[in-house]
Amino acid sequence: MRSSGRSRAIRAPATGSADRMSTLRLILGDQLSTSIATLRDIDRQADRVLMVEVDEEATYVRHHQQKLVLVFSAMRHFAAALQQEGVQVDYVRLDSASNTGSFSGEVERALQRRHHDRLVVTEPGEWRVRQMMLRWQKDLGIPVEIRADDRFLCSLAAFAEWAKDRKSLRMEYFYRDMRRKTGWLMEGDKPVGGEWNYDRQNRKSLPGGMTLPRRLRFDADEMTRQVMQLVKTRFGHHFGDLESFGWATTRADAQRALAHFISECLAGFGDYQDAMKSGEDFLFHALVSPYLNIGLLDPREVCEAALQAYADGRAPLAAVEGFVRQILGWREYVRGFYWLHMPGYERSNFLDAKRPLPDFFWTGKTDMNCLHEAIDTTRRHAYAHHIQRLMITGNFALLASLAPAEVEAWYLLVYADAFEWVELPNTHGMALFADGGLLASKPYAASGAYINRMSDYCSGCRYSPDKKLGEGACPFNYLYWYFLISKEKQLRSNPRMGLAYRNLSNKPEAEIEAIVAQAEDFLENPGREAAQI
Ligand code: FAD
Ligand code: DLZ
Ligand code: SF4
């Protein structure tokens, strides 16, 4: 049964004391923080927390099986922790017989079960859910208070104020303002060490034979095992492996993961932030985005842990600045950006990209070893690190002119940390340049030479990054030039593309013709080699 959505009062008869107000407090699966605004001012005797596992959220895109396990198991652990604190929690499991399958239906049912005077929620992370919530007051006949999500370091109002009257929004300037506001890595009004950004030092490839840090993964407890069984039964056809699940599902374990990253990996994070290596899924990355995004960790505590490591001399400035920039800068920036440009942001298609997503995005079966590695780690962990997302799968999607909506649906479902507020700007804006430069000043387009420089993938590939055309040539090479040729109308006037277009003009006509022929032949069926595997 689904909520009819008609306007009516559906409140159960009052049962509590006449002068004590009762509030229903809805907590969503990415709001698992005891500091969440919804829980403030809770009256433990009179109020109830509502948490619901619903089919609609599990299937609006077919999330990776590990993402489903993470969200449901973390929800169940969070509910149990609240109950231990004496909070009354009304928890609806996915397999409960009367589950209506939607947020609206479950809120309606909770109001039928018990009398409440009002509903309190914290604003959600997706436009889709916000629109749903805005209808509840009228549809359910109860006052609904939607509170600001103040777990972020920059409020939406402060971001809108920063963005106002700016011709273009660039993360770097936002980040500098946030450094000034927080005082992090500042000496008075100057950045510590004299530079705002140490990225130039953060682009090393991994030296051969380097020992990489052991990563902390977590064994599934009984609660997680039950959820794994549920997911296997109901969503076993969704993308991704289940058995390799190793994510933390409680705040305590997420804090352990953070502490482990700070002590074992942060010092190497800066230098090797852009590096990639075959068979190494995590390198020096933090693996904290799923925890930040569902609320098990708070961005302030994550940044402060890194700042403390710098203060104690346990990590160099370039690493700590690089890490803090990802959270204080990028994470806050994309969230403000998303809400500023929604709705409608996802509809732009500046580069007129239309090709369907090749099948190997689901199977990982392709002779292009870099793509195989990035998709395979995604399948095994619901994770790939930033450079794999941007410069391997993202770069391919950009160069191959894949339809933004298909690529975005893929990114939203395959990663454990994917929620639209963070996934969409990164995919639509940063990786695909589909917004024509609202988020990034130029497309992140690269040939095989970049991938060869930053990884060891090419040595295990049937293609050669040194070969530009003909049999065995790396597809990224001719696709890169074909991209410039076919998108010239949109990109030539971009000042940051000047050098690329000057290089293109130096190419003889015969070479251009050969590039176009080979690229178009490849793009007709990019997955054709998979048949040989
Ligand atoms: P680290 O590399 O160790 O970085 C530390 C933290 O910084 C991350 O946990 C994350 O919270 C934050 N961060 C870093 N880069 C970004 C960024 N560009 N935007 C926002 N936060 C950032 N991140 C998500 O959280 N959810 C997504 O759905 C998502 N989709 C992406 C799609 C594409 C096409 C690209 C290019 C990037 C995407 N990112 C997304 C950003 C980034 O790739 C991930 O945050 C990062 O890989 C998470 O792994 P980590 O915790 O090991 O990060
Ligand atoms: C991602 C997700 C999934 C798979 N399932 C649920 C759920 O059953 N119940 C719930 O409260 N939240 C879930 N979530 C997270 C929501 O999709 C998320 O809260 C919205 O997208 C708003 O950001
Ligand atoms: Fe990727 Fe090209 Fe290197 Fe193969 S040769 S791994 S396709 S960049």
Image (cartoon, rainbow, N blue to C red):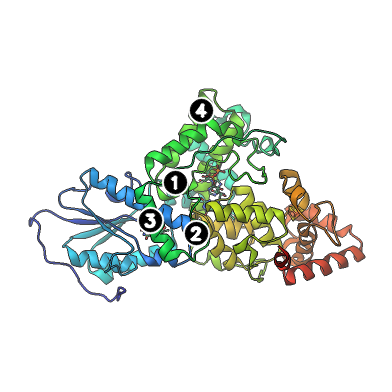
Marks 1/3: CA distance? Answer: 18 Å
Which residue sits at x=58%, y=34%? Answer: 213
For the residues carrying marks 4 and 3, which lies nearer the camera in this image? 3
Marks 1/4: CA distance? Answer: 20 Å
Marks 2/3: CA distance? Answer: 14 Å
The answer to whether the residue bearing label 2 lies less than 8 angstroms from the nearest atom of ligand 2 is no
Q: State which quarter of the image contains the N terminus.
A: bottom left
- Circle nearer the N terminus (2, 4): 2
Amino acid carrying label 4: it is Ala
Q: State which quarter of the image contains the C terminus.
A: bottom right
The answer to whether the residue bearing label 3 lies less than 8 angstroms from the nearest atom of ligand 2 is no
Neighbor class of circle 1 (other Cα within 10 Å; few <14, some 14-19, many 20+) is many
Marks 4/3: CA distance? Answer: 36 Å
SS state under label 2: loop
Give yes or no for contact between labels 2 and 4 (Cβ–Cβ under 8 Å). no
Would you name the residue on which mark 2 appears?
64
For the residues carrying marks 1 and 4, which lies nearer the camera in this image? 1
* Quadrant field for ligand 3: bottom right
For the residues carrying marks 2 and 4, which lies nearer the camera in this image? 2
- Circle nearer the N terminus (4, 3): 3
Left or right of 310? Residue 29 is left
Would you name the residue on which mark 4 appears?
309
The one of 465 and 24 positioned closer to us in this rendering:
465
Would you name the residue on which mark 3 appears?
227
Amino acid carrying label 2: it is His
Amino acid carrying label 1: it is Tyr
Q: Which mark is residue 291?
A: 1
